[in-house]
Image (cartoon, grey):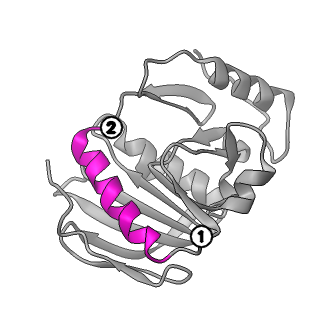
């Protein structure tokens, strides 16, 4: 598929709706992740075991602190039409009320309280750059990037205070260092159990 310039301003446009229709009809092998990144439909293979292990560790810790009326989702589509994006984050913490309002296969990214992306070797730059800009544009309050493939070794970075397409770095460290997630989570995530490939 070639990239076409799209008018994907907030709200619905025929171009955005056509892109979403193609996304919904994309026939990918089971377990693959199909996303729209900057107007291009991408297909990624199923995550590695270490990737899933890290997601499980984070998810278990988050369940200890989130309100009953929030959920933690690993396959929830989050849309950012203004960035021509429809992402499937590794973890999205979203109030259940947001899910109950939507009738499609995705919710507005703006409805998320926290997004977690865990990089894969083949598409790490999407998580570091393109998705970070999309989540910031959508005003997702917190973005946690678990970068297993960072130059110099695995890192974990918490972003916050989004403005336009940019976040401020709230914390950056290496695997093994604890990271504090501010309110409404108010928790410390211990990363020493994160597997290193």
Count of numbered tags: 2
Residue at point 46%, 50% (across, down): 129
Q: Secondary structure at mark 2?
A: loop
Residue 77 located within the stretch drawn in magenta: no
Q: Is residue 106 left or right of residue 149?
A: right
Mark 2 vs mark 1: which is more N-terminal? 2
Q: Residue at x 85, y 45 (%)?
A: 11
Q: What residue did someone put label 2 on?
A: 47
Q: Where 149 falls versus 23 (above or below)?
A: below
Say which element carries label 1.
loop
Residue 34 screen position, x and y as percent: 52, 29
Q: Which residue is mark 1?
A: 141
Is 178 in front, or is 55?
55
Q: Is residue 54 visible?
A: yes
Q: Mark 2 and mark 1: span between their CA atoms?
A: 25 Å
Quadrant, the N terminus: top right
Circles 2 and 1, Cβ within 8 Å, touching? The answer is no
The residue nearer to you, when weighing 176 against 129, is 176
Q: Is residue 147 visible?
A: no
- The reply, left or right, for residue 6 in relation to residue 169 is right
Is 64 in the magenta?
yes
- Which stretch is magenta? 48-65
Q: Residues within 10 Å of mark 1 (few under 14, many from 20)?
A: some
In the image, residue 66 sits, relative to residue 6, either above or below, namely below
Above or below, comparing residue 4 to residue 62 in the picture: above
Could you tell me residue 14's position as x and y percent?
Answer: 85, 27
Q: Main secondary structure of the magenta part?
A: helix
The x and y percentages for residue 151 are 21, 53
Mark whose residue sits in front, 2 or 1: 2
Q: Bin the neighbour count of mark 2 within 10 Å (Cα to Cα): few under 14, some 14-19, many 20 and up.
A: some
Residue 130 is left or right of residue 16, and the answer is left
């Amino acid at each position: 598929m070639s990239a076409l310039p799209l008018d994907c301003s907030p709200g619905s446009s025929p171009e955005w709706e056509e892109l979403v229709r193609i996304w919904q009809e994309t026939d990918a092998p089971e377990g693959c992740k199909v996303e729209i990144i900057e107007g291009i439909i991408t297909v990624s293979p199923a995550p590695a075991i270490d990737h899933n292990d890290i997601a499980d560790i984070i998810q278990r810790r988050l369940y200890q602190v989130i309100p009953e009326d929030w959920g933690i989702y690993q396959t929830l589509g989050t849309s950012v039409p203004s960035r021509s994006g429809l992402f499937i984050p590794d973890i999205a913490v979203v109030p259940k009320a947001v899910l109950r309002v939507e009738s499609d296969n995705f919710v507005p990214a703006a409805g998320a309280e926290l997004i977690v992306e865990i990089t894969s070797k083949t598409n790490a730059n999407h998580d570091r750059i393109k998705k970070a800009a999309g989540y910031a544009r959508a005003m997702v309050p917190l973005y946690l990037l678990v970068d297993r493939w960072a130059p110099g070794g695995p890192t974990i970075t918490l972003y916050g205070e989004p403005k336009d397409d940019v976040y401020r770095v709230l914390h950056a460290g290496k695997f093994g260092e604890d990271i504090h997630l501010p309110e409404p989570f108010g928790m410390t995530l211990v990363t020493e159990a994160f597997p290193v490939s």
